[in-house]
């Protein structure tokens, strides 16, 4: 069942570029199935269209997760990764899009999935990815006033930003 | 005496007091005696009724994912225990399974069955903790003590196997830390019999208890559509009537061989969440007994020099094993470059690990899809419109675990 729906998604979302059609989710590189999950590599602008198609046409009703991978030195630097699950087909799909450090913006999926609100806030905390359309980008795992994005590779692990000042005699690190 | 420095507020409420003159904004938590878990809720109250709720987590954030990036694949395992500390073994095995699939390793038959058995045992502990805590917060002290007593037998029993009550660090890439000690399985059966006895007493005490039903039935209702939209999984989603379970839908370990049912609720209220968990515990006991029957003798670790440590006498006796041991400790197991997402059915829902490797002995990225965190994203749906006092049983039945929510 999984393979059949993967084929349909691929022909709908991934092969559009080769056929010269203007489909909502044009893949940059050919898609493939990796460890049982269909992987689609998309342009950032195509993610919202692809997610809508996944939800409305293919029954991917659970938005599982969004995170990012930092590849310093590569251009574009950040790879944003979404995972979806279909309760009907019992399979997962991964969307990926690369965004540059200068404008790390991807569309928000809050209009499609309620779970996007919290998970996008976490990804924004950790990597500074901007989810356009998510009105609530307050820190969620971090706190108000935290400077920087700790999961970026150039954020030193030792850096401390205490909200409560150190007592006298304690040296501040980082 | 120096005056205390002014400490900035770590959170900002989504709504400010004074927007309406007939409501009050109350800040509940992060360390409130009636909510087990460090969570802060800003509630806009109209009398005793919650109009809007703004849930804040992050008080237990300790940089789990950042820390993993500077530890070898093996050394990350103790951090996994501290995600969901009510069922640490499920986290251990989910992480190890993810790494093993990336390495293309198939673990031994005995390890598969033992991991399945211990995952279910861990789920049993987790559900016992959740139900016990919910009941205690409603004043059912006897039921709480019954359940926590059984849970403590289990903790001590697991400690006899792993050496620790809570943070076991028992999983290993390619197998398990050690085999069962003598007499472990007979004691397991003793505990399961006692569990049946005491769970029966708890059912008798609360299931048809008027006070319990009044606090639980039709309180904190979550619709199936909302549950799906907000990414709910596990007992929370099943309590809305949808039989979605990673163990059935994308099976792993020995689950395809086991006979078990996926209990579902009717309308997703607190009572359904209690009952789904209670039924799941019975299914877990059923599965544990099947696993005991499936258990056969054999090695618990794969014979693969990329991840399994050589026997200690060999390390001291021959140069190849010494170097092998040294490389595994100093550099870590080499995991082929690539990315993978693997989900196990955690006690609270889909526990997923997204790992990225660049071929080093240290992970490039470890991301945990924690069910508790996703569940907190929709917690306001179950609070709004109900009384402030309903927050206590509702929050208890969500079973938010700070360790995995805040990572």
Image (cartoon, coloured by chain):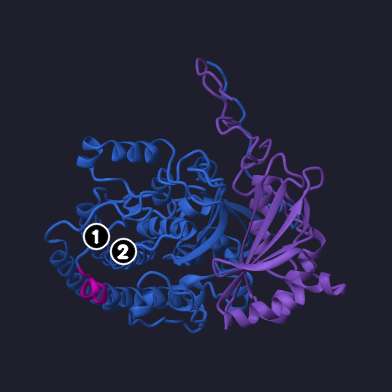
Q: Residue A24 versus residue B263: which sits nearer the camera?
A: A24
Q: Is residue A101 above or below residue A112?
A: above
- What is the x, y in percent for residue B126? 36, 63
- What is the x, y in percent for residue A55? 70, 76
In the rendered image, which quarter is residue B157 located in? bottom left
Chain rendered blue: B
Q: Is residue B295 magenta?
A: yes
Is residue B17 something one can see in this rendering? Answer: no
Give SS at disc 2: loop
What shade has chain A been given? Answer: purple
Q: Is residue B367 above or below residue B187?
A: above
Q: Residue at x 47, y 62 (%)?
A: B392
Q: Over which residues does the magenta segment extend?
A: B289-296
Dot 2 or dot 1: first in sequence order is 2
Q: Quadrant of the C terminus of chain A?
A: top right
Estimate the spatial distance between the alpha carbons at disc 2 and disc 1, rounded to whole Å: 7 Å
Residue B379 vs residue B217: left or right? right
- Both on one chain, marks 2 and 1? yes
Secondary structure character of the magenta stretch overall: helix
Residue at the spot of label 1: B299
């Amino acid at each position: 069942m999984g393979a059949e729906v993967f084929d349909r998604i691929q022909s709908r979302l991934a092969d559009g570029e080769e056929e010269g059609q203007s489909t909502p989710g044009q893949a940059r590189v050919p898609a493939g199935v990796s460890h049982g999950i269909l992987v689609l590599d998309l342009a950032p602008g195509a993610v919202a269209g692809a997610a809508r198609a996944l939800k409305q046409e293919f029954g991917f009703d659970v938005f599982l997760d969004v995170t990012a991978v930092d590849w310093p030195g590569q251009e574009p630097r950040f790879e944003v990764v979404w995972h979806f699950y279909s309760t009907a087909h019992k399979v997962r799909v991964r969307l990926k899009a690369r965004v540059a450090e200068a404008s790390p913006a991807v569309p928000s999926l809050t209009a499609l999935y309620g779970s996007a609100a919290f998970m996008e806030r976490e990804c924004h905390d950790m990597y500074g990815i901007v989810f356009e359309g998510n009105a609530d980008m307050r820190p969620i795992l971090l706190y108000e006033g935290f400077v920087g994005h700790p999961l970026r590779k150039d954020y030193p692990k030792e850096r401390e930003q205490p909200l409560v000042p150190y007592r006298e005699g304690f040296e501040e690190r980082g | 005496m120096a005056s205390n420095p002014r400490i900035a507020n770590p959170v900002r409420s989504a709504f400010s007091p004074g927007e309406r003159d007939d409501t009050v904004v109350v800040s509940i938590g992060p360390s409130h005696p009636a909510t087990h878990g460090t969570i802060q809720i800003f509630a806009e109250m109209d009398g005793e009724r919650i109009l809007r709720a703004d849930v804040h987590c992050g008080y237990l954030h300790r940089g789990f994912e950042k820390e993993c990036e500077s530890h070898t694949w093996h050394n990350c395992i103790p951090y996994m225990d501290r995600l969901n500390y009510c069922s640490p073994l499920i986290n251990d095995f989910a992480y190890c399974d993810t790494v093993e699939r990336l390495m293309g390793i198939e673990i031994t038959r005995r390890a598969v069955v033992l991991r399945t058995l211990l995952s279910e045992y861990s789920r049993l502990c987790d559900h016992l903790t959740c139900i016990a805590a919910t009941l205690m917060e409603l004043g059912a002290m006897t039921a709480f003590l019954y359940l926590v007593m059984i849970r403590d037998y289990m903790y001590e029993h697991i400690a006899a196997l792993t050496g620790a009550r809570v943070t076991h660090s028992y999983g290993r890439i390619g197998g398990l830390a050690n085999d069962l000690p003598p007499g472990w399985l007979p004691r397991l059966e003793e505990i399961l019999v006692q569990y049946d006895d005491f769970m029966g007493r708890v059912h008798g005490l609360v299931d048809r208890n008027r006070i319990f039903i009044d606090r639980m039935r039709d309180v904190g209702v979550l619709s199936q559509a909302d549950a799906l939209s907000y990414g709910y999984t596990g007992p929370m989603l099943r309590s809305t009537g949808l039989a979605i379970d990673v163990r059935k839908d994308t099976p792993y370990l020995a689950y395809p061989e086991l006979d078990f049912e996926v209990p579902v609720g009717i309308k997703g209220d607190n009572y359904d969440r209690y009952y789904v968990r209670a039924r799941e515990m019975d299914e877990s006991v059923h599965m544990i007994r099947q696993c005991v029957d499936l258990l056969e003798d054999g090695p618990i670790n794969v014979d693969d020099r990329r991840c399994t440590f050589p026997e200690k006498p060999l390390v001291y006796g021959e140069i190849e094993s010494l170097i092998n041991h040294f490389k595994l400790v100093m550099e870590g197991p080499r995991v082929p470059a690539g990315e993978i997402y693997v989900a196990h059915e955690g006690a609270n829902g889909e526990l997923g690990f997204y790992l990225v490797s660049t071929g080093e002995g240290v992970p490039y990225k470890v991301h945990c899809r924690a069910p508790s965190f996703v569940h907190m994203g929709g917690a306001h749906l179950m609070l709004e419109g109900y009384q402030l006092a309903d927050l206590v049983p509702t929050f208890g039945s969500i079973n938010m675990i700070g360790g995995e929510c805040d990572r």
